[in-house]
Amino acid sequence: MSGWAGIFCDRACILGEGPVAHPGLGRLYWVDILGRHLAERPFSGGSTTLHDLPVMASMVARVDDTTLLLGAEDGLYLRDIGTGRLSLLTALEADRPGTRSNDGRVHPSGALWLGTMGKNAESGAGSIYWFFRGEVRTLFTGLTIPNAIAFAADGTHAFFADSDAGTIWRVATDPVTGLPTGERRVFVTIPASEGAPDGAVVDADGLVWNARWGGASLDAYAPDGTRVRSIAMPARQVTCPAFIGPDADTLVVTSATEGLDPDRSDDRFAGRTFTVPVRVKGRFEPAVRVA
């Protein structure tokens, strides 16, 4: 278990995902998709607060100091941080009960990219949508497990993956709108024997930090797609990284117990949220622009 610094939260998620830092509040938010919980914890430690959710939510974004946005199985919800009240902002695939949301991130423009997938990972049932100031557009279709949505700091390009295909793509984007401006090109392909690309973030130096599901690793890729670092993680099914701390210089990574033997004797830290023992030039995800 060398290569990792510690456990940020000891609660085991069935499918921990979608972490995002809220620098104004000094807290990390993340979800347990299958457990239907939203979790929050101060950067500095202390207790983790769990909030029950009536829907399966897969990612979190900040709107402002009083409101979060949740990507969920039937649409985008606003959540009042003080009261916990949820209100549906925009329906998304609400007429397709067999799908749910998955990975999502906010572009520097404030536009949200959000992936959807079949609840049983049906082949080709997934898409990636763009949401900006109340407008929704479909960007990509025919995906199975959309993941690794992340953006360069200057907004000029995006990354996204299909975990089922083991491929991360890179595509040019408009810095003002977050919309694609070119064709996607293969950035990285991960052999199935090494796991699959899951969630990702891009640091201020342009490194793409990707959680490798099934590979017990957090990998860093240079802008040309070269893997420049791999950090061993204490759980095989790591899912998504985020930057935390006052200076966004600490990485945390969520993980999952989904599909594992209940006693998890060979993966006893599965489902926990971890801190990573490297200092990075991270950056906080922008607020999503809902209006």
Image (tube, rainbow, N blue to C red):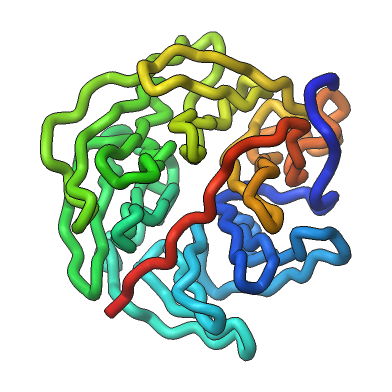
The quarter in which the C terminus is drawn is bottom left
| Residue name at image x 48 percent, y 33 percent | 205
| Residue name at image x 65 percent, y 23 percent | 217
Q: Quadrant of residue 152?
A: top left
Residue 216 visible (yes or no): yes
| Residue name at image x 35 percent, y 38 percent | 122
| Residue name at image x 84 percent, y 59 percent | 45
Question: In the figure, 138 relative to 210: above or below?
Answer: below
Residue 252 visible (yes or no): no
Question: In the figure, 202 relative to 24: above or below?
Answer: above
Direction from residue 245 to residue 5 in the image, left or right: right
Residues 126 and 81: in front is 81
Direction from residue 246 to residue 94 in the image, left or right: left
Question: In the figure, 25 relative to 2: above or below?
Answer: below
Where's residue 237, x and y in %?
Answer: 65, 31
Where's residue 273, x and y in %?
Answer: 74, 46
| Label total for image | 0
Where's residue 150, x and y in %?
Answer: 40, 42
Direction from residue 58 to residue 76 in the image, left or right: left
Q: Quadrant of residue 235?
A: top right
Where's residue 288, x and y in %?
Answer: 38, 67
Direction from residue 162 to residue 53 in the image, left or right: right
Q: Residue furthest left?
A: 182
Residues 121 and 176: in front is 176
Question: In the figure, 217 relative to 51: above or below?
Answer: above
Residues 119 and 198: in front is 198
The quarter in which the N terminus is drawn is top right
